[in-house]
Amino acid sequence: MPSPPSTPASPAPETAPGGGLAPPTRSEEPLPTRLRQLPRSTWPLIALLVGYPVWWLVGLGVFSFVICAVPMALVLLNRRPMRVPPGFGLWVLFLIWYLVSLTMLSENPPGAYGEFGMGRIISVLVRLAMYLASAVIVLYVGNLSERELPRLLLVRMLGAMFVTTTFGGLLGVVFPNFTVTPLFGMLLPGRVRSDSFVQNIINPTASQIHWVGAVKAVRPEAPFEWANTWGNNYSILLIWFVIGWWVYASRKRRMLGVGIFAVSLIPVVYGLNRGLWLGIGVSALYILVRLALRGRAMALGVGAVALVLGGTAFVMSPLYAQVETRLDNPQSNSIRAYTREKTIEATFTSPIIGYGNTRYAVGSDKTVVTGKTQACPQCKHPPLGSDGQLWLLLISQGFVGAGLYVLFFLNAIRRYWRDISPIATGGVLTMLLVLYYMTIYDGLYTPMPLYLLSFAVLWRNGMDLAPPRVEPVAVRAKRARDKALSAARTRRLLETKTRRAALSTRTSGRPVRIGEGQRVRTREGQRERHGGPAGGIE
């Protein structure tokens, strides 16, 4: 299998709308520059990314990815042959393992419990639907040509979702008690609508309110399901926003992008999300390292100065007190350590296929008594596998399922690491963040399709810029030798024809063999040296 290209050969960059540069492409045809110029086959993706605020308000924010995956699948049915990304077999095996793990749904590990009821069945089906929808989105985006869906418009649609995330975060900071009765919830049966899991994913709320020490912390979550999910999606979408609104953008768009980014930092700081802060730090460090490896000293210096100035301004601002308070009150550390320990213990009782879903621990980090009591009002049933995607996979699909999931993203990093184009650099960073966030954030529900959509952008970029396959050195050497031998034979043949034509002229058209011609020239030379006539043979 050929290794990924390091610096793909491509024509000069085209001009993007507004005067900026567009990603290089092999296509010589003019590409669409506006959403209204795209063909009808792209409307499911436009409705999903650009129209996401509407989906959220009606209570279908989580299910919008599944709903839009249906017309995407119909588009794929008309595509022959269908392209499949490298390493996609790992994701297929992961889905198969998910189905196998469902055989353990009715079982409970030692030291844990859970009712095999409607809530467990609904959560399992929703997770399966999200995994399948994510796979469909990858195939759909990858099978659209650059003419149908240019990468720049795809990246900017993801940037538009970042703008939605920013204003949703501001809504949570300014109006933390904002909520809407979802239209979709009114259509559900009462038994389903009353389930706590269903309420969490269909009710549009602006924020979650927690007390950090003596400080009331407003953690924005709109337009997603939880505050941690907001931080997860923010950092993923920020990458594509920077590429679409700064790297490939005009001066006007860049100024607008800087303003939007500055505003987005307000909910980032007030949300007191430590995982998000660390994720942004990892992203900045990654960019600096890639710039250093490419020898971009000027860009590296500018980035370092910007980080120093930004950090200094932050420390001197009132927001620093908010962050310091959050770091001094790590309220979730003890419960996270407890549930992770219990999750690993439960996983070892079914290490191959897991238990199909989460369970509740018996006891908690504060007491061995299960659940809330009058003496311990903070005690509750901690759910195992709720501290991140890794722990969910371990208890649900065992070590094998978790390994397949990790290998899928590691393979994407390995394959596209050498590609230094901006889109590939951002895509690899996204894959790295997926592996980091899986230890602290749930990958479900809305983050998972965004993970796979980012992978699809990475795949599309590799296809559109991939140079011809590089032949092995031995094949190239043999071809060079054959070419040199052929040129030598041609040169000797031309020399022979030239000599024959010259001899034929000197012998008045009488055909003379090459050997005879040599004797003729020798005799002529001898007679010339002896002062004889220099004419023909006597």
Image (cartoon, helix red, strand yellow):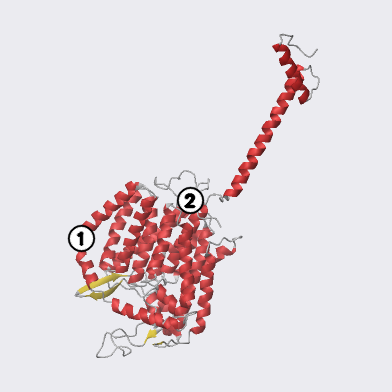
Position of residue 345 measured from the top left corner of the image (x, y, whole percent)? 40, 82
Q: Residues within 10 Å of mark 1 (few under 14, many from 20)?
A: few
Position of residue 83 measured from the top left corner of the image (x, y, whole percent)? 57, 60
In the image, taking residue 86 as reference, residue 232 lies left or right, namely left
- Sequence order check, earlier mark of 2 and 1: 2
Amino acid type assigned to the residue bearing label 1 in the image: Val
Q: Quadrant of residue 239?
A: bottom left
In the image, taking residue 319 as reference, residue 124 lies left or right, namely right
Closer mark to the observer between disc 2 and disc 1: 1
Question: Mark on residue 315?
Answer: 1
In the image, taking residue 142 as reference, residue 527 lies left or right, namely right
Amino acid type assigned to the residue bearing label 2 in the image: Pro
For image coordinates 20% across by 60% down, the residue present is 315
Position of residue 458 measured from the top left corner of the image (x, y, whole percent)? 47, 58
User: Between residues 223 and 382, which one lies in front from this camera angle?
Assistant: 382
Q: Secondary structure at mark 2?
A: loop
Q: Secondary structure at mark 1?
A: helix
Position of residue 16 measured from the top left corner of the image (x, y, whole percent)? 42, 47
Q: Disc 2 and disc 1: Cα gap in Å? A: 45 Å
Q: Residues within 10 Å of mark 2 (few under 14, many from 20)?
A: some
Q: Quadrant of the C terminus?
A: top right
For image coordinates 73% across by 12% down, the residue present is 527
User: Between residues 88 and 486, which one lies in front from this camera angle?
Assistant: 486
Question: Mark on residue 32?
Answer: 2
Q: Is residue 332 something one can see in this rendering?
A: no
For image coordinates 28% across by 57% down, the residue present is 262
Q: Quadrant of the N terminus?
A: bottom right
Q: Is residue 345 something one can see in this rendering?
A: yes
